[in-house]
Image (cartoon, rainbow, N blue to C red):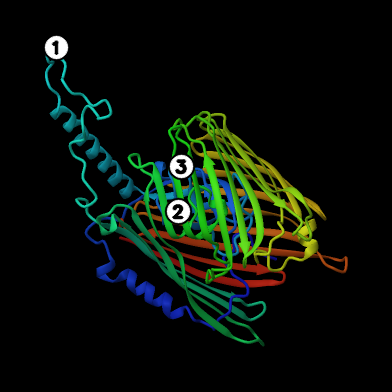
Amino acid sequence: MTNPGSRREPGWPGRRRPLTATFCLLACLCVLPAWSDAEAPAPAVKRLDVRVTAYSGGSIYLDRGRDHGIAAGDIVVIYPSGGAAFEAIIRGVSKSNARVELPPGTQGINIQDRGEVLLPVVRLEEEEEAETIATAEAEAKKRAIEVPDHPEWSAPPEEWDDDAPLLSPAFSRTNEEKPTLMRGRVFFMGQNNWDDENDNEFSSARLGTELYIENPWERGGEIHFDGEMQLRAADIDGGDDSSSTRGRVDRLSYSFGGTRDDPDFMEAGRFLQNEFPEFGVLDGIEYSSRLESGGRLGASFGYMPELNSPYETGQDMQLAVFYRTDTGDPRDMILGVAYQNTWHKGSNDRNLMVGTLDWNPNDQLSVYGSAWVDYYNGSDEEKGDGFELTEFRLNSVYRITDATGVGANVSHSRWPELMRNEFSSSTAADVLDNRTTRTGINAWHKIDNNLRVDGRVDYWKDEDDSGNSGDIRVALRDVLYEQGEVAVALFTTKGSFTDGKGVRVTANKSLADGTFALLSWEGAKYQQNTSNGTDTDLDQQTLRASIDMLLGATRNISVYAEKRSGDEVDSKSLGVFFQQRF
């Protein structure tokens, strides 16, 4: 059985207790005077409600972004309908969305699942103060250039340039006059998992940095670097012990343009494609231009790194062209269309068309959809000729009132036929037959400021079987204690090999000094269908605790522990996340 929300990564090679020294070293660093903010009190946090709008690979996307104060590196608490609450890290932020990197092995996430982003109040206050100062300066400049009414001109000017602005900006600076600024963060993530049932131990650690350099070489633009070192280790009882350490560069690129004054945008290097992230990470170049209509037209070209830990590159080349509408009115529908052609070791591989829909006609309704269509020709052995809908997703949320809302989602997916090694364990039959359709509805209602009810029902069907799941959750906030929530959820699930039902209890609390604590317990009874046709009943429990602490305005640390027990399972986990912004 795999526990939903578990951070364990089965199969990682390594050696017993490789992280003990690292954990101790990290703890020492956190208490050193040089790393403390003793002169200023630690900030409190503000909880921002968010919803999951999409799930792709090891990431989920939220319906809030930079406009709501979210920044890369923030902690988000996810309350999945298919598992226990857990914390994750926000890795990327746009104006209205945020990308969350899920802990390895996370399961049970569904579209429309709820979450809370923990926003440091001190940062929000600093941003609000900076905005207030900027507004005051703008008003002061406006007052400074106000002049009394002038009598009518006695004669028109002899020369007049209709293409020149009436008033030129008085305070603009060239790139040579602007400073070069650097910002970023360093982080450490480590976890240890003890499988006492089988006397095995698994460990992992990641040490990385993300760096932004604005206006390098005094020519504008921005350099973005994101890289890390990884340790994977395991001690297998009766097997071979092994460990590996490797480095990986997730991003190294230079971008410029795309501003109000410069409609042309270009990025070169290694990066997640901007306009259509559905096409993945690229080692190459992307260019786009904003048209007079507000839409963006562009193309990208380069190599696609392998979907493995070292991000090997050079075997798969891609060329993509795209267009996305954008009138500038947030109420207008935004449509996107793109085409991608890929080559594997020089041979034509994939012909993919992607369409997207993003529509928020009012404050109550939001709709997001995407469709992937593959085209196959005579060179494809399994699929034959013609078009095939490979992936389709549509989800919507309707907020009836500030306290009540409903959501619905539907998705369909099939495996594409590829030369590229994206599905290493797939067979020809898998590629030909595999298909999965999912539908779901959910609703929530805040009875008052202290009582909230959430519910969900989902149905799935694949080429062999069908199943369903559902849950109902009741949460009390600021009732048993201040600045906290206690929730009870009942859930049931029916899968191809496992059916189960259970109860989940979660409690969390925010402290005034910026600490956030979470405790959850889950008890479930599963019926597992074995290959010989017999059923096995399994009673399992999971106890999980975590604490997040803001150590000043620029750093935070999170520690979590988990204990799983019951039939055929006995394991425990310990993990830590530390981050320093600069």
Packing grade of label 2 (10 A; few <14, some 14-19, many >=20) is: some
Secondary structure of the residue carrying numbered label 2 = strand
Going by the numbered disc 3, the residue's amino acid type is: Ser
Going 56% across and 48% down the picture, which residue do you hit? 487
Location of residue 35 (image quadrant): bottom left
Going by the numbered disc 1, the residue's amino acid type is: Glu
Asked whether the beta carbons under mark 3 and mark 2 sit within 8 Å of each other, the answer is no
Packing grade of label 1 (10 A; few <14, some 14-19, many >=20) is: few
Q: CA distance from mark 2 to mark 1?
A: 55 Å
Secondary structure of the residue carrying numbered label 1 = loop
Please state which of residues 19 and 344 is positioned toward the viewer in this rendering.
344
Tell me, for residue 96, which label it has, or none. Answer: 3
Asked whether the beta carbons under mark 1 and mark 3 sit within 8 Å of each other, the answer is no
Kindly identify which residue carries mark 1: 152
Going by the numbered disc 2, the residue's amino acid type is: Gly
Q: Earlier in the sequence, mark 1 or mark 3?
A: 3
Please state which of residues 452 and 422 is positioned toward the viewer in this rendering.
422
Residue that protrudes farthest toward the right in the picture: 533
474 sits left or right of 275 in the view: right
Q: Earlier in the sequence, mark 2 or mark 1?
A: 2
Going 63% across and 77% down the picture, which residue do you hit? 196
Q: CA distance from mark 1 to mark 3?
A: 48 Å
Tell me, for residue 92, which label it has, or none. Answer: 2
Q: CA distance from mark 3 to mark 2?
A: 11 Å
Q: Is residue 528 visible?
A: no
Please state which of residues 334 and 232 is positioned toward the viewer in this rendering.
334
